[in-house]
Image (cartoon, rainbow, N blue to C red):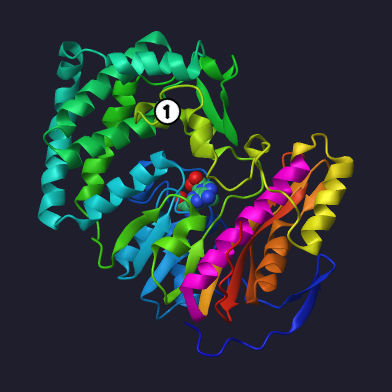
Amino acid sequence: MKSSPRQLSLIFADNEIIPKSKTAAEMDIEPLDATFRDSNRAPLHSWFPYLEGYSPRFVDRVRLEYLPNARRIIEPFAGSGTTPIALGQSGVDCAYSEANPAMAFVIETKLALLRATKQDRTRISEELLSLDRAIPALMSTTKPDKELAETYLAAFGSSRFFEDEALDQVRTLRTIADQILSTNTMLGNCLTLAILASLIKTSQLKRAGDLRFKTPKELLTKPPLPIEAVSARLQSQAKDLLNLPGLTGNAWHACNAAADLGDQIDDGWDGVITSPPYLNGTNYIRNARLELWFLRLVNKKGDLREIRDIVITSGINDVDAQTKWAPTTIGVERTVKELTEHAYDDRIAKMVGGYFHDMRKVMASLQNRVKVGGMICIDIGDSMYSGIHVATDDLLVETAEDLGLRTVDRVHLRKRNSNGGQLLRQQLLVFENLNRTRIVEA
Ligand SMILES: C[S@@+](CC[C@H](N)C(=O)[O-])C[C@H]1O[C@@H](n2cnc3c(N)ncnc32)[C@H](O)[C@@H]1O
């Protein structure tokens, strides 16, 4: 923790007065550290590609700068687990929440391997290589899982996400994973994770922002078969397991919804390192529908909706009659009004109002659990709808200050582009907890 936060001078940026912050370069943060690029190459972190993630190096740099003596840090939006893993490997305890149960499975599988002994990881590495050699023969003697065919139909109807051969292979791999899970949980979970990481790659879908069907042109390149993609995954898992630094801090899943963290963890946490959903319409749960189906967490129509109900309102489809979108600050009110007048869909204004309603609840809940003087570090980007700038970063600062947090730094991380080509930004917001409130909001 910083013993005496720096005196801040003022500069003008985007016509607003904001504190003069450290630069990312001064903190040794490169623009792409705040993206998943390096996680995609890093041992273990790369086991599940997660477009919305950042890198372990980013977590380390933020911790060393703002929470150098911290023993316990909260991560409310854990995603693929970058924060709890990086913290746990540095000896810092981390309680985390994650609303998407498929991502919670990804995180827990990785953490369980890090909690295992080095000898156990070496043994699992050997088992993974044997399994990889055995799978082609197993595929020809194992029946495809029957239930998965039924739930596919019940959840997705006639949508054709896979070619027939690929779908058969996915269902057969489900049976094989179940057989292994009945006797060897860690090996079974590694195989399950390898299959999850291969589903989109072997389907007719593509992640481009949200998940969409590939175009006929994109389909000219045939996707690999699941058995090929899974084999590549098993081999790289086996390699990574031989050289992983284990956990020296505890990391645990405290609850699903970030707003419930306040009820699930004790007091006196040193701070927070996180990246909440951006207000860019990403449909986290719908994007994970294949993984959720494979994990048997989505079995019929309506199951996705139930999971989506606890996610921070950040996509148009998250808006429904239950969304609480009444503006929570003056700035949010101004933006909601502009969007109501000009946006192409009236759900956009409600989505923005709903986002800040939900984020205020999460921030209040964190504020209650972080000790006085603790630092709350948030990576966030802004958005643009119908030419109207939604300054998510500014509005989060306003929300935080309204709750009694003090803005310590706003670090510019990198430039981004909106879908329409307008210039956007990504920032690290750092707040100090000045006092603990006992706000309980509906
Ligand atoms: C920007 S991503 C975080 C990525 C993470 N930093 C990483 O490196 O993988 C935001 C995450 O918040 C999760 N999320 C959304 N609403 C949530 C809520 N109410 N409670 C907990 N997690 C939530 C999403 O499922 C998503 O995984």
Asked whether the viewer can see residue 349, the reply is: yes
Q: Residue at x 50, y 84 (%)?
A: 2
Percent coordinates x, y for residue 181 in the rendering: 18, 33
Between 375 and 10, the one lying in front of the other is 375
Give the vertical position of 66 relative to 334 (above or below). Answer: below
Magenta highlight on residue 360: yes
Please state the horizontal and vertical placement of residue 71, each as a whole percent of the image: 36, 76
* Residue under the point 36% across and 14% down: 149
Residue 233, horizontal then vertical, whole percent? 30, 35
Could you say whether the residue bearing mark 1 is in a helix, strand or loop?
loop
Q: Residue at x 47, y 71 (%)?
A: 369
Amino acid marked by disc 1? Val
On the rendered image, what quadrant is the C terminus found in? bottom right
Q: Residue furthest right?
A: 341
Res 266 → quadrant: bottom left
Residue 28 visible in this rendered orientation of the protein:
no
Number of on-image labels: 1
- Residue appearing at x 42%, y 74% in the figure: 267
Left or right of 193, for residue 391: right
Residue 151, located in which quarter of the rendered image?
top left
Give the residue number, with chain letter if any, for mark 1: 298
In the image, the segment drawn in magenta is 348-372
> Residue 365, how many percent across, how many down?
53, 65
Magenta stretch: helix, strand or loop mostly = helix
